[in-house]
Structure formats: C-alpha cells, structure tokens
Amino acid sequence: MKIGFDGKRAAQNFTGLGNYSRYALEALEMYYPNEEYCVYVPKDVNNPKFESLLASSGGGMKKFLPVGSWARKFKSLWRVWGVTKDIVDSGVQVFHGLSNELPLNIRSAAPSVRSVVTVHDIIFRRLPSCYPFIDRLIYDYKFKRACLNADHIIAVSECTKRDIVKDYGVAPEKVSVIYQGCDPLFAQEVSSESKVKIKEKYSLPEKFIVSVGTIEERKNLLSVVKALLSLPDDVHLVAVGRRTKYTSLVDKFIADNNLAHRVHLLHGVPYLDLPVIYQCADAFVYMSLYEGFGIPLLEALNSRLPVVAATGSCLEEAGGPGSLYVEPFDVAAIAAAIARCLQPEVKARMVADGLEWAEHFTMERFAHKTMRCYNMLLGLK
C-alpha cells in the first residue's frame, strides 16, 4: 500500500499537532514497515525529530517538497490545491490529513485516491471568545470541508466525534475514534541525579503540583492558582507553558494575594526536561475548559502522578476512572480534590489506577486501528 500524508505539522510544529503527526507516522512505520509512506511538506524546516523519523525508516518513508517555481513560491496554495497532482502522480492510494485538513480539491482532482482526515477538536465553536473572529471563520471552513470531503474521519476522542456529528451533520458511522498515546519517555523512570539537576535548574520547591499547557484563557490556570489559597503553605504550583496576554491576569492575582513564593511559571522548557519535572511533582492538575483529548493527562499518568482534571469535555476519557474531576471554576472543589489526592493512601491508589488506564493508549493499538481504517477504505481485510 502507498499512503500519503499532509506533513506540514510533522515538519514545522514542535508540540501539539506536530507531536500527533510524528506519533502517527512513527507508529505506522514501526508496525507496518513494508508499506510505502509519502509525506508531503510545504517547506523544509530544521526539525531533528522529523528528520530522525525519516532516517530511521530506512527509505520506507519519504519526504516530498513542492516542485516547480509556482509551487515553491506559493507553498500554502500548493498544500491546499497543487499537492493533489503530486499525490496522483506518486500513485498514492490513501491520503491522510493528520491535522484537521485535506486539500480542498481532493475529490475532484484525485478521485482515485481515498481520503482520511484526523480531527482533533472544534473548540473554536465551543469557546468562540478564545479565538479571533477571522481565525474561527477559516478553521470552520477548512474543518467542515475536510469532514464532508473525506471518505472517513478519525476523531481523537468520543467527545470530538460527538462534536463533529452534531456540528457538521456527519453520519456517526463515518467517524472512528482512535486514541493517541503519549511519548514513551514519560513512562521511563528518571534517576535521582536527573531530578536533583532539574530541581536546581528551575529552582523547584520540595512539594508541588504541576500543570502543563499554554497559559491562556481556555487552560484556566487562574482557577488552580486561586485554589492554592485553601491549601497548606508548603504546597506550591509549577505551571509549564508559553505565556500569553492571559498570563497578566494570573500575575496580578499572584501579586495581589502574596503568592509569588508559591507559584512558579516556567516557559521555554526543553521537551526532554518535561518528563523529569512531571516525576518531581506530587500531583497533576488540569483545569482546561475544553479539550479535544488531553495528552498532558496521559503524560502525567505515565509519570506516576495522581490527576485532578476538569469536567465538561473529554478529559475523563484521557484520565480514566481513577482520576478526580471537578467543575473548572469551582475553586473550593479544586482545592479539596488536590488535598485528597495528596493523601498517601489515596495517591497510591490513584497512581496504580492511572498506570492501568494508561495501558489503553499504546502505539501498537493506534497503528493497528489506523491501518484497519485504510484497509477498510480500499476494500481490504
């Protein structure tokens, strides 16, 4: 089988959709090394993770860049229109849009190619205030067009599937839920020496809860900061994520309530430091208002942390029955849940349940279900 992929995010993004795209490519190449994989990339970017993935495939996975002066000059148009000619010329049988999109002319320009799109979320429809108006229009057009044009849709969670079916009028049988796992790095126990180095590097406190994600309105870090006021003084919060305008609200609350010594905001943290920070923590807290799935929860479970997460979207799917869930603006409930999971007996039980739940999200399972989808589209067993 020859399978094509929209590789923009795999090559150009270093987190989020980029991680998913590389995870998908790695999983398929690992468990189905005899297939041919064509990854279409608008431009070359220095991304060691992506280049390492290509190199490790032994030639089974190849990168394709725009060819011709027009395509090289108008890379974005090539991705949404011109790439279909390259797909057909390469003999691709199935084309997979890994990040919510497909070429807009996939049906008319490549009628012989079966298409799949992975939809991660349509949060811009649930929380429109968190997105600029023009961005919402563009996302909605591209995502809906991809869902209607695709021969099949992969949703990253049951929550996302429900949203697609409801908002875009897609038949439920056209959508398969295939869960992603997280990087195996998070399950590898780090050494005591590594923990000491990371604690010194970031001046981490002795006892802390951790939250990971961009510090923006949707992630709702302010509710977690407010909960600190109801927790013992020796419980600190370490938040790892890129700063946005919303961070100024968090900073103001910290200053007004004399919490500067208990709240540690870290940004620009190298990826390889993240598993160590998780494993230095005592619990993981994630009060995001809406998510497509919630990979940070899986990272925390694999890092042997109890998890406290928000209700209202898909986080119960990622965190499993052993985690605690509270309404994201109920500060008293957040504080109570954190206090509970820090109790030794409760923490031990939650960690054990979390590790068991995390076994549902393996790269092998992801690869088999995704390949089964391709085979179904081609009428293969």
Image: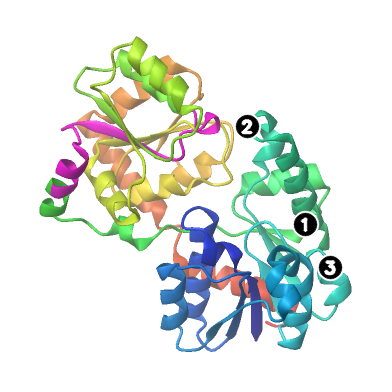
Pick whichever of labels 3 and 2 is earlier in the sequence: 3
Q: Residue at left 21%, top 17%?
A: 233
Q: Which residue is mark 3?
A: 105
Quarter of the rendering containing residue 242: top left
Which region shows up in magenta?
197-220
x, y (%) of residue 287?
47, 30
Q: Secondary structure at mark 2?
A: helix
Magenta stretch: includes residue 195 = no
Quarter of the rendering containing residue 107: bottom right
How many residues crowd around disc 1 within 10 Å: few (fewer than 14), some, or many (20 or more)?
A: many
Residues marked 3 and 1 touching at CB (< 8 Å): no
x, y (%) of residue 327?
51, 24
**Disc 1 residue type (three-letter):** Cys
Q: Secondary structure at mark 3?
A: loop
Residue 376 seen: no
Pick whichever of labels 3 and 1 is earlier in the sequence: 3
Pick whichever of labels 2 and 1 is earlier in the sequence: 2
Residues marked 3 and 2 touching at CB (< 8 Å): no
**Disc 3 residue type (three-letter):** Asn
x, y (%) of residue 28?
52, 75
Q: Which residue is mark 1?
A: 147
How many residues crowd around disc 3 within 10 Å: few (fewer than 14), some, or many (20 or more)?
A: some
Quarter of the rendering containing residue 174: bottom right
Q: Nearer the viewer, residue 192 or 259?
A: 259
* Residue 27, disc: none
Q: Nearer the viewer, residue 366 or 121?
A: 121
Q: Which residue is mark 2?
A: 130
